[in-house]
Image (cartoon, grey):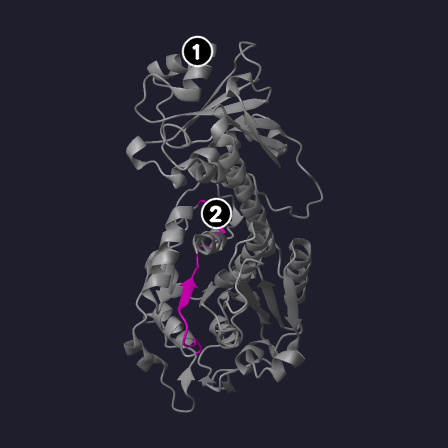
């Protein structure tokens, strides 16, 4: 979608549809909405008085000017209560409005920047939120189908123009729009990787996609094959892949900004990349196995985040690590009671072959320790226990550093990807005690998200470390267990990519 910024009055736009807004409880529209209302001889005020438009968050109404102004349609979107207004409400409104524009077949759309006027938000951040949500709301996985539908709902929105009357706001709006587009396109990449079937998005294909992305945006990229992983003593990772016909890959992406000091250590992002998870010999039940193509959603988020980091030229060194494997059943697959040695020498007794994600993250965390990091953050669809505890909207955060924890929570809140801190208490280590190794790879069902984090802590070095358990939030179906968000579409979400980018930009 082509994104542009234009100075002037939105009522003069020649777009197929223009988008203005209304707070709940407002009876006389003001600002740009008031200007459009006046040009339409009070039509917006009339529908407000009639009770057809109340300004509830995400409510939309389409008016047809009939030549009174150049645009063919006027879409009014509700912003909700003024005292509850924030960037997430901007995203909700923008997502709802662009979907309405698409449903009526508008190819070229113009919008005001919700919150950039009387909403009182930073105009650049508001512009970023409008662009992000508008693009994310229009995402659709390009599935291979023999027949393509040809109806209005499938006609693309080709352009979005942000219109602002005040010329002093144009520059910050342009900066926000550019950031929003870069981030949204990066989420597109993450969503597509996670939406692809696992026979397409194999470990090798994921590595190739990362290499292609890095070449496009100017990141360095190195891929370790299994022989190199063996040289690196990645025994935990190789245990998971030993039964697979698809070879494992270890992806290393690096952003080295010119503005960084020569001795400045990187922030390391680590994403779990299990391309498909059968559970191995601890076989999942059939209903639980469906959807396991998304067990590499953490990897997809890290790959997408690295793309955004490069495009935004964030002046902080960042390294993205993605261990990617398949966890399948075969004659050579690893088994319960096997013992393997991780890269740092810690021995692991296998209790559940379905606890494979923490195995591959273990060696990745060990690798990160040698990069002299400022901080390390890993993300994984790790445990069903997290879903039981927090559901699909809020993700679990385990962290050994208060400042890092607070920064991540603030970033998640700002972008609408909330995090909740869970205990990283050493008292839970007794559940991981093994008679034949240093630790077991599973502590059972009780407090499973906590014991998984405690397992990973054995491989976290002496630097600030955070673990995000994002199980359940990797996909969105708009079902009863999902919190409805207008800018999410069915399928992969790309979470927590935008949290990572906001956290890194805030540094």
Q: Which residue is drawn at 55% across and 77% down?
A: 237
Q: What element carries label 2?
A: loop
**170 in relation to 64, above or below:** below
* Towards the viewer: 188 or 30: 30
The location of residue 326, given as percent across then percent down, is 59, 70
| Residue 503 visible, this orientation | yes
- As drawn, the label of residue 477 is 2
**400 in relation to 291, above or below:** below
The location of residue 361, given as percent across then percent down, is 50, 72
Q: How far apart, in angstroms, are the residues tagged by discs 2 and 1?
A: 41 Å
- As drawn, the label of residue 38 is 1
Can you say which quadrant of the picture contains the N terminus? Answer: top right
State which region is magenta.
459-478
Q: What element carries label 1?
A: helix
Can you say which quadrant of the picture contains the C terminus? Answer: bottom left
**293 in relation to 108, above or below:** below
Q: Tell whether 222 sits left or right of 113.
A: right
Outermost residue on the bottom side: it is 436
The location of residue 421, given as percent across then percent down, is 32, 61
- As drawn, the label of residue 328 is none
Q: Is residue 469 magenta?
A: yes
| Residue 480 visible, this orientation | no
* Towards the viewer: 295 or 38: 38
- Residue 233's image quarter? bottom right
Q: Is residue 195 magenta?
A: no
Q: Tell whether 65 sits left or right of 154.
A: left
* Towards the viewer: 266 or 237: 266
**Disc 2 versus disc 1: nearer the observer:** 1
- Residue 252's image quarter? bottom right
Q: Tell whether 198 sits left or right of 272.
A: right
């Amino acid at each position: 979608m082509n994104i542009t910024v234009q100075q002037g009055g939105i009522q003069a736009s020649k777009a197929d549809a223009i988008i203005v807004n209304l707070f709940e409880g407002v009876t006389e529209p003001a600002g740009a909405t008031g200007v459009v209302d006046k040009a339409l001889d009070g039509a917006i005020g009339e529908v407000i008085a009639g009770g057809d438009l109340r300004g509830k968050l995400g409510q939309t109404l389409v008016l047809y000017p009939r030549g009174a102004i150049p645009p063919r349609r006027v879409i009014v979107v509700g912003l909700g209560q003024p005292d509850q207004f924030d960037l997430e409400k901007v995203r909700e409104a923008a997502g709802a409005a662009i979907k309405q524009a698409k449903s009526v077949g508008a190819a070229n759309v113009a919008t005001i920047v919700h919150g950039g006027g009387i909403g009182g938000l930073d105009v650049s951040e508001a512009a970023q939120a409008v662009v992000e949500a508008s693009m994310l709301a229009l995402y659709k996985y390009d599935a291979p189908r023999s027949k393509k539908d040809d109806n209005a709902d499938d006609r693309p929105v080709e352009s979005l123009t942000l219109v602002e009357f005040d010329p002093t706001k144009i520059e910050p709006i342009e900066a926000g729009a550019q950031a929003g587009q870069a981030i949204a396109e990066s989420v597109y990449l993450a969503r597509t990787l996670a939406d692809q079937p696992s026979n397409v998005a194999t470990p090798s294909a994921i590595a190739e996609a990362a290499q292609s992305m890095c070449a496009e945006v100017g990141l360095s990229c190195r891929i370790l094959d299994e022989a190199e992983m063996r040289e690196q003593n990645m025994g935990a990772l190789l245990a998971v892949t030993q039964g697979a016909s698809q070879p494992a890959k270890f992806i290393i992406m690096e952003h080295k900004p010119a503005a960084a000091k020569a001795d400045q250590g990187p922030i390391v992002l680590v994403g779990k990349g299990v391309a498909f998870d059968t559970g191995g010999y601890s076989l999942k039940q059939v209903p639980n196995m469906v959807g396991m193509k998304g067990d590499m959603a953490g990897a997809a988020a890290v790959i997408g985040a690295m793309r955004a980091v490069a495009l935004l030229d964030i002046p902080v060194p960042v390294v993205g690590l993605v261990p990617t494997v398949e966890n399948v059943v075969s004659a050579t697959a690893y088994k319960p009671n096997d013992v393997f040695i991780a890269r740092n020498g810690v021995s692991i007794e296998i209790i559940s072959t379905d606890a494979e994600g923490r195995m591959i993250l273990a060696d990745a965390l060990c690798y990160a320790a040698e990069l002299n990091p400022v901080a390390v953050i890993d993300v994984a669809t790790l445990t069903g226990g997290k879903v039981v505890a927090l559901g699909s909207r809020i993700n679990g955060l385990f962290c050994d550093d208060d400042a890092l924890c607070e920064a991540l929570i603030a970033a998640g809140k700002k972008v609408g990807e909330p995090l909740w801190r869970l205990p990283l208490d050493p008292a839970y280590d007794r559940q991981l005690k093994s008679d034949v190794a240093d630790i077991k790879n599973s502590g059972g069902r009780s407090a499973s998200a906590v014991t998984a984090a405690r397992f990973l802590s054995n491989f976290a070095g002496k630097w600030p470390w955070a673990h995000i358990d994002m199980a359940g939030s990797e996909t969105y179906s708009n079902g009863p267990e999902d919190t409805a968000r207008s800018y999410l579409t069915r399928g992969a979400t790309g979470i927590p990519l935008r949290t990572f980018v906001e956290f890194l930009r805030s540094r």
